[in-house]
Amino acid sequence: MAEKRDFYDVLGAAKGASEDEIKKAYRQKAKQYHPDLHPDDAEAEARMKEVNEAYEVLSDPQKKGRYDQFGHAGVDPNAGAGGGFQGNFDFGDLGDLFGNIFGGFGGGGRTTTASPNAPRRGPDLEEHTIIAFEEAAHGCRRTLEVNRVEACDDCGGSGAARGTSPRICPECGGSGQKTVQQRTPFGVISTSKPCPQCQGRGKSIDSPCPKCRGGGRVRKRVPIECSIPAGIDDGQVLRVRGEGNKGVNGGTPGDLLIGVTVRPHPIFERDGYNLLCDIGVQFWQAALGDTIQVPTLDGKIEQRIAPGTQPGTVITLRGRGVPVIDGGGRKGDAFLRIQVEVPEALSAEQRNQLEQLRGQFPASSAASPPKAPPLPPEEKHGFFRGRKK
């Protein structure tokens, strides 16, 4: 029988190492030699048994003390021999250790890998659509053609050719996994891996479907009708639940994510749920006042212009903006900014009339700054700042 190596050397720990240092050294060696990482490797299996034996001794304060004093003679030579181990090692502590490293510890039959037959959610899909400004404000419906993964029509998702059906894999009994149990000084460790015969599906297909080649799923181009809510803005993403790729093993489907681009409007500009629009009036309308027609998202309405309206004056139309998404019918406001239009050419009669009126108006003072037009609260916070000209 080959002479046993020093337990500290086996773990790669220094003489007199602390409990935490021994646990850390064991963790590193377990990652290096564990059967999950080295399947069918006899040498790695032997090394792992050696590591288990060393940790069983050095993790126990009493045994560690005897080993430090007398070496291998101070501990039971059969302590690491397998089923005969009767020490007082804390199995719960090692179970937590293996749970952190491999996802589970096998004294009670737990496995270290997730079942390949577990339901899995389908991946999301991403699409893009372009809508008009009015459609974004009022909401609309769109039908998009998308390529997504669905169950095969020919085989109904089974993967088997018509007239046939999958059968339970005789190798794994339908579980999709092969479980190997190993007895160690710390209990029975169960490790699982996909069944080599059915590749983890749990079913064996003798005659694969020619359309999906046994996969049970195909990529199809399908129309999807979606509702775009009123108030959506340029660059926002709309999520349509359950319209993405289909799930696997009965898993839920993914979602359809639609990126929305809104075409600019020739008159209105948008800031959140508010609208801005420049309104041109004749200089006589600004001076005398008038009732004019102004545009809104719902059509033209009449609006009174007060006498003496200054250029740049802003008129607020409450509730004439864009609907607030999920806002219970609330809307933003529309702001009409008055632009006074000065005629570029005058007839002789018009010029004569203006010349007669010139003397009736007080002369403007170049030293006095023009009167600032009334502005809404939004203007003070930069609502119109940086507006495109």
Image (spheres, rainbow, N blue to C red):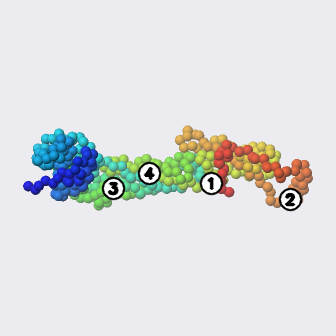
Identified by mark 1, the residue type is His
Q: CA distance from mark 4 to mark 1?
A: 28 Å
Q: Residues within 10 Å of mark 4 (few under 14, many from 20)?
A: many
- Front tag of 3 and 4: 4
Q: CA distance from mark 4 to mark 2?
A: 63 Å
Q: Secondary structure at mark 2?
A: loop
Q: Which mark is residue 347?
A: 2
Q: Residues within 10 Å of mark 1 (few under 14, many from 20)?
A: few
Q: Nearer the viewer, residue 5 or 38?
A: 5
Quadrant (top left, top right, bottom left, bottom right) of the C terminus:
bottom right
Identify the residue at horizontal 78%, vertical 52% (top origin): 282
Lateral position of residue 211 relative to residue 46, left or right: right
Dot 4 corresponds to which residue? Answer: 256
Identify the residue at horizontal 84%, vertical 58% (top origin): 346
Where residue 349 appears, as percent x and y from the top left, is 89, 57
Dot 3 corresponds to which residue? Answer: 217
Q: Are marks 3 and 4 in contact (CB under 8 Å)?
A: no
Identified by mark 2, the residue type is Ser
Q: Is residue 36 visible?
A: no
Q: Name the N-terminal-most of marks 3 and 2.
A: 3
Dot 1 corresponds to which residue? Answer: 265
Q: Name the N-terminal-most of marks 2 and 1.
A: 1
